Amino acid sequence: MGPLQGLKILDLTRVLAGPYCTMILGDLGAEIIKVEAPIKGDDSRHFGPYQNGESAYFMSLNRNKKSITLDLKKPEGKEILKALVKEVDVIIENFRPGTMEKLGLGYEVLKTVNPKIIYAASSGFGHTGPYSQRPAYDGVVQAMGGIMSITGAKDGEPTRVGPSIGDIAAGLFTAIGVLSALNCRNEKGIGQKVDVAMLDCQVAMLENAIARYVVTNEVPKPAGNRHTSIVPFEPFDTQDSKLVVAVGNDSLWLKFCEVCNLNEIALQEAFATNPQRNKHYELLRPIIASKMMEKTTHEWQLLLDKAGVPNGPINYVDQVLEDEQIIAREMIVEVEHPVAGKLKMPGVAIKLSETPGCIQTAAPLLGEHSAVILKTYLNFDDEKIKELIEEGVL
């Protein structure tokens, strides 16, 4: 029974950014009512891979949710949504800006239905600005937001980050926005609109790239796997694989040199401080690289762990699923789906001591909860629900 127990959310989102946001809120105890189009449902229900005919993509993002089908283009579908808005705390959508307004269901309309409603919108470019009406996907905002321009091999082509961080970041920021708006409502009694743009989130994630540019006037470029400001902070080849070493300060540098038997260079002027190590990177890296080839990754791990020097192997996904730390933290969980059967997926990353989140239910079947939601929230009877199905509203 997580910390958001009692919070009711209407989820009109689909594919990734919005469903990721509502998954987080659902994991933490909110009741998520996922509104989907009849017959087709969320687009991601049609994305592979499939298990027993069910999309693993969809199931991994839509646990802890209830599904109701509703045709929002039909007048009665609109009225049902408005009736549900009166009963919930939050509505979240990730349509292109203007779509909800065309349906007559934009924020200005819905706040008259429920003045305390939190209306959260996640879109490619936001609800204002010259790009507002443009469509966007993850790769587009990674490109436009600068993330691709600093990712990739040194002197190589700009590279898309593997996970869809354009969507994931927007989902995270939208969840933060919803919780912030709810806190404000608890304090002041007012609802409001939360407007999150995928492009904005990519810019917010540029970390020190903007600072480096405005201070040095040098445009950051892909630098491979090394850190642009800290040395040594990158993977090195060992006798059997690769090991990432992260020497984040000068004290760790001394410990690292002690472990690696590099004491003769530890206090040399060219290497004693991080700015100097960064300046003389091309001279230092081959020295460390040669030393790291003397042992296996596991042997180095044991020595560096004992000395307190941060390090880690480059795990492939199959290794992640078997990692003892990840297992101990319940970050790989097995969920039972009524059709697909058992499916492993990431667990709940936010650990709370008194009100922990959890995965209570698998992703819903399309429209699985339509009847129970309409009966519970709107007191519809079986005859009315049957009529709505026949009319194509459900």
Image (cartoon, helix red, strand yellow):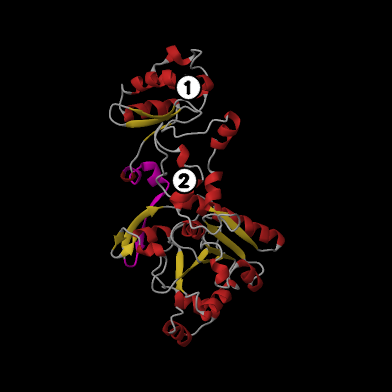
Residue at disc 1, secondary structure: helix
Q: Is residue 8 magenta?
A: no
32, above or below 280, in the image: below
Q: Quadrant of the C terminus?
A: bottom left
What residue sits right under mark 1 in the picture? 253
Q: Can the viewer see residue 349 in this picture?
A: no
Percent of width and height locating residue 25? 52, 58
86, above or below 268, in the image: below
109, above or below 203, in the image: below
- In the image, 269 versus 162, the foreground residue is 162
Query: Residue pushed farthest front?
Result: 130
Mark 1 is on which residue type?
Trp
Residue at 48 percent across and 55 percent down: it is: 136
Query: Residue pushed farthest right?
Result: 188
Mark 2 is on which residue type?
Ala
116, above or below 123, in the image: below
Residue at disc 2, secondary structure: helix
Percent of width and height locating residue 336? 35, 62
What residue sits right under mark 2 in the picture? 143
Could you say which disc has been placed on residue 66 in the image? Answer: none
Q: Is residue 12 left or right of residue 189?
A: left
Percent of width and height locating residue 250? 52, 22
Residue at 60 percent across and 30 percent down: it is: 215
Numbered range of the magenta stretch: 319-339
Distance between mark 1 and mark 2 Cα atoms: 35 Å
- In the image, 254 versus 325, the foreground residue is 254
Q: Residues within 10 Å of mark 1 (few under 14, many from 20)?
A: many
Percent of width and height locating residue 95? 51, 63
Query: Residue pushed farthest bottom?
Result: 383
Q: Is residue 333 left or right of residue 270?
A: left
